[in-house]
């Protein structure tokens, strides 16, 4: 008798995950080139790790990836909410569970016996990155079209503050990605699951 393999990640979710990865890599690398044209802080990124070659080229890459990320993000939220997956996977988050799982993670004792549900730390991390990407998009709109989005511009402080918000939202995304990749390295079956769905 063949073992029954449960599909944990449906095809649309896996497709969405990998499209997001491509869009975010393009956006970060082209964003670094855009940043270098007018640095906020007293450093710039090495040209070898930027995308676009020049400011105009970087802007083209950035805007193309922005639309890809935006449409893909809307699809992700829509399908998660309509399918009921959003509520089932990310809620509830109980403070006691969060503290216990966080302490277990710090001690290296957080178990991954089942991949069919997220622990409290994962739930919070994924909700954080969803919020962070939304903040990246909103602050990016202000940086791109400050006159056309006056309310957003004012909510961010002004154009210069929106650039700072955009920069630190990118830093937060890269921090999440680093932790995410570390966890995948520690529990490699999660990568297989994101490729095969089960």
Image (cartoon, helix red, strand yellow):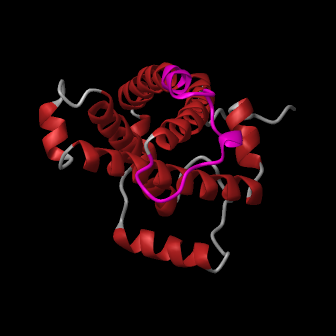
- In percent of width and height, residue 137 lies at 36, 35
Q: Is residue 168 above or below residue 86?
A: below
Viewer-proximal residue, 164 or 118?
Answer: 164
Q: Which residues are magenta?
A: 39-61
Residue 140 image-quadrant placement? top left
Q: Specify whether residue 162 is in view.
A: yes
- In percent of width and height, residue 131 lies at 36, 46
Q: Is residue 105 above or below residue 173?
A: below
Viewer-proximal residue, 177 or 79?
Answer: 177
**Residue at the extreme right of the image, as rendered:** 1
Quadrant location of the N terminus? top right
Which residue is at 39% across, 33% downward? 84
Q: Specify whether residue 198 is in view.
A: no
Which residue is at 67% across, 58% downward? 183
- In percent of width and height, residue 72 lies at 47, 23
Which residue is at 64% across, 49% downward? 115
Q: Is residue 197 above or below residue 36?
A: above
Q: Is residue 53 magenta?
A: yes
Residue 18 image-quadrant placement? top right
């Amino acid at each position: 008798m063949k073992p029954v393999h449960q599909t944990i990640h449906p095809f649309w979710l896996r497709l969405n995950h990998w499209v997001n990865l491509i869009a975010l890599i393009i956006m970060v690398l082209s964003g670094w080139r855009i940043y270098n044209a007018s640095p906020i802080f007293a450093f710039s990124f090495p040209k070898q790790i930027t995308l676009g070659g020049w400011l105009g080229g970087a802007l083209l890459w950035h805007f193309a990836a922005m639309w890809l990320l935006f449409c893909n993000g809307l699809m992700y939220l829509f399908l998660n909410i309509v399918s009921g997956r959003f509520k089932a996977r990310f809620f509830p988050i109980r403070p006691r569970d969060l503290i216990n799982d966080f302490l277990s993670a710090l001690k290296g004792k957080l178990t991954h016996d089942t991949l069919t549900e997220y622990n409290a730390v994962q739930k919070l991390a994924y909700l954080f990155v969803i919020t962070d990407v939304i903040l990246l998009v909103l602050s990016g709109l202000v940086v791109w079209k400050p006159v056309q989005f006056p309310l957003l511009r004012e909510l961010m402080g002004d154009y210069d503050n929106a650039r700072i918000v955009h920069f630190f939202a990118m830093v937060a995304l890269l921090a999440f990605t680093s932790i995410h990749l570390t966890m995948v390295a520690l529990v490699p079956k999660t990568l297989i699951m994101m490729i095969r769905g089960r």
